[in-house]
Image (tube, rainbow, N blue to C red):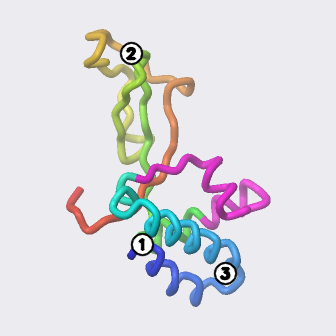
């Protein structure tokens, strides 16, 4: 289901076809082995780099932009709490300076050390 979303992108971006086919194969394999668990997949930039075999960060940025514009993935920013849990935001611009860790009931300053970019599959759900 998700792997099929790559076909039009492969056709529209032939210069990136090999990398996009690798993502298509990865998603297809993951979905065939784990079924609906694919909906909960979260990939960090390093994993995206490996799957796409991007070769450089600038190429990775271009490939990720294609995958986001093609509505295969969407970017999320995860703020990790000391307790190990976290909360996601749609963008860096929406990050607060301080956030409450509900597990420890403490305020946590949001810094580069506790934020992580990640990519999740776009589903048909609202939000």
Q: Is residue 57 magenta?
A: yes
Q: CA distance from mark 2 to mark 3?
A: 42 Å
- Residue position marked by numbered label 3 in the rendering: 17
Q: Position of residue 61 (x, y in %)?
A: 64, 59
- Which of pointers 3 and 1 lies earlier in the amino acid sequence? 1
User: Badge 3: few (under 14), some or many (20 or more) residues near its Cα, within 10 Å?
Assistant: some
Mark 2 secondary-structure assignment: strand
CA neighbours of label 1 inside 10 A, class few (<14), some (14 to 19), many (20+): some
N-terminal-most mark, 2 or 1: 1
Kindly identify which residue carries mark 1. Answer: 2
Which residues lie in the magenta part?
Answer: 41-63
Q: Is residue 63 left or right of residue 92?
A: right
Q: Badges 3 and 1: C-beta atoms under 8 Å apart?
A: no
| Rendered view: 109 above or below 90 | above
The x, y position of residue 68, in whole percent, is: 47, 65
Magenta stretch: helix, strand or loop mostly: helix
- Residue at the image position 36 percent from the left and 20 percent from the top: 98
The image quarter containing residue 95 is top left
């Amino acid at each position: 289901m998700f792997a099929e979303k790559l076909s039009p992108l492969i056709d529209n971006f032939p210069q990136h076809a090999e990398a996009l086919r690798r993502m298509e194969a990865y998603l297809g394999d993951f979905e065939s082995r784990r079924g609906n668990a694919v909906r909960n997949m979260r990939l960090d930039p390093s994993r995206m780099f490996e799957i796409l075999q991007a070769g450089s960060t600038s190429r990775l940025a271009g490939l990720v932009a294609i995958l986001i514009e093609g509505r295969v993935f969407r970017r999320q920013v995860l703020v990790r709490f000391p307790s190990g849990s976290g909360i996601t935001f749609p963008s860096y611009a929406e990050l607060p300076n301080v956030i409450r860790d509900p597990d420890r009931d403490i305020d946590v300053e949001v810094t580069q050390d506790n934020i992580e970019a990640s990519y999740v599959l776009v589903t048909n759900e609202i939000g």
